[in-house]
Image (tube, helix red, strand yellow):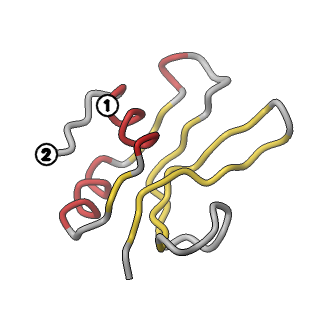
Amino acid sequence: MGARIRLKKFGTKKRPYYRIVVMDNRSPRDGKTIEELGYYHPIEAEDKQIVFNSEKVKTWIQNGATVTDTVRSLLNKKDFSLK
């Protein structure tokens, strides 16, 4: 099983929000998650847009989970190092 850290979409039309989740890389975007790590709310104020548990993210990356480009850019906005 290949785990991937990616976004899961919620909300309504023109009011989206996303959860940062760990999923099997074969599952659909809105499918079953393994674990939720945080959320991204693009409509909120700049300081409240991205919230995640950095310890859980580090643990999943150390265990071999890959990170999508979008989530990688969100983590970098919060000065989170992926190394």
Q: Is residue 57 left or right of residue 13?
A: left
What amino acid is labelled 1 in the image?
Answer: Asn
Q: Which mark is residue 28?
A: none
Mark 2 Cα shell of 10 Å, populated few (<14), some (14-19), many (≥20):
few
Mark 1 Cα shell of 10 Å, populated few (<14), some (14-19), many (≥20):
few
| Residue 64 location (% of width, % of height) | 24, 68
| Residue 24 location (% of width, % of height) | 47, 74
Name the foreground residue: 29 vs 10.
29
Residue 43 sits in quarter: top right
Image: 41 above or below 55: above
Image: 43 above or below 31: above
Which residue in the protein does label 2 denote? 83
Which residue in the protein does label 1 denote? 76
What amino acid is labelled 2 in the image?
Answer: Lys
State the CA–CA distance, disc 1 to disc 2: 11 Å
Query: Residue at 62% across / 45% down in the picture?
Result: 18
Q: Secondary structure at mark 2?
A: loop
> Quadrant of the image for the C terminus?
top left
Mark 1 or mark 2: whose residue is earlier in sequence: 1
The residue most toward the right is 13
